[in-house]
Image (cartoon, rainbow, N blue to C red):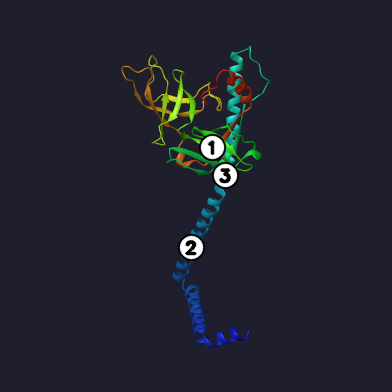
Amino acid sequence: MGALLRFLFAYRLFFTFILLEVFSLWMVVTRNSRQKTAWLTSSNEFAARTMAFSDAITGFFSLSGENEKLARENARLYSLLTVSRQTIERMRMDSIQAPPGFSQYSFIVAKVINNSVARPNNYITLNKGTLDGIRPGMGIISPEGVVGRVMVCSDHYSTATSMLHSKMLISAEISRIHAAGSLKWGGENPDVANLEFVARHLKPKLGDTIRTSEFSNILPEGIHIGKIKRIRLKDDATFYSIEVDLATDFSTLNFVYVIENKLQAEKDSLQVKVGGSIE
């Protein structure tokens, strides 16, 4: 306490000067309408900017929560969409019956916490694992299109093979003509993949939509993949060489949907007997 008093006494003239300056400023502002108006305008503008900055900071930190809410809602809508597709399919195929309201696929929302796009073999890490229902082999999509497949899991995290991987194949089709093929990344441009094994007697066109086919083992049929950007056919070739402009921007992945195929084990047990599938 003594040290504080000695400090105040030593700088008494300085503090007196500051006090008089503040008092003088107050007198000028309160006794003159022009200065009062200018002061109020400036102070209001400063307060407004401070509040705007505060709101921006608050909004930034709450944005993650809002994004996750939207991702959960999208997952619910994806689930409803697959139920609708399966209902329509059952109406077409009366010999195959499933329980009313049965959905073959369920969707788990996860956040991307690590991602690569510039390597020959790229991987994605998610913030959810086996405790959240994720298992190796599950497919992954984004709101824009196909992303990849879960490779390994721990209790709280998962690592997935990105579609930008040399050994990743996706069963795909040209939706307009229902021409099936295999989609594989070329290893260079993260925005482009190659659609292989489309027979030369078919007629693909630039801009045709590419989606997952009914032969996909890990993904529902009809998930968007991209559009055809280039078509080549050599004179002696059996298949087209087709480049696809991918809909998913792998450099900006945020929230994704991990897909559980509830009938996959049953399907796998049959496919093992005949040599498996491409996925």
Q: Image point 53% across, 51% down: which residue?
A: 60
| Circle 3 crowding by C-alpha within 10 Å: few under 14, some 14–19, many from 20 | few
| Tag 1–tag 2 contact (CB < 8 Å) | no
- Distance from the alpha carbon under mark 1 to that under mark 2: 49 Å
| Circle 2 crowding by C-alpha within 10 Å: few under 14, some 14–19, many from 20 | few
Q: Position of residue 94 (x, y in %)?
A: 63, 12
Q: Which mark is residue 173?
A: none
Residue 158: tell me if it is visible.
yes
Front in this rendered view, residue 166 or 249: 166
Disc 2 is placed on an element classified as helix
Say which of marks 2 and 3 sits in front.
Answer: 3
The image shows residue 59, relative to residue 94, as above or below, that is below
Q: Amino acid at mark 2?
A: Phe
Residue most extreme to the top: 95
Q: Which mark is residue 160?
A: 1
Q: Amino acid at mark 3?
A: Glu
**N-terminal label among 2 and 3:** 2
Residue most extreme to the left: 235
Front in this rendered view, residue 272 or 220: 272
Give the residue at mark 3.
66
Disc 1 is placed on an element classified as strand
**N-terminal label among 3 and 1:** 3
Q: Based on the displayed image, in which of its 4 quarters is residue 185 positioned?
A: top left
Say which of marks 3 and 1 sits in front.
Answer: 1
Say which of marks 1 and 2 sits in front.
Answer: 1
Q: Based on the displayed image, in which of its 4 quarters is residue 238 positioned?
A: top left
Give the residue at mark 2.
46
Q: Image point 49% across, 27% down: which residue?
A: 170
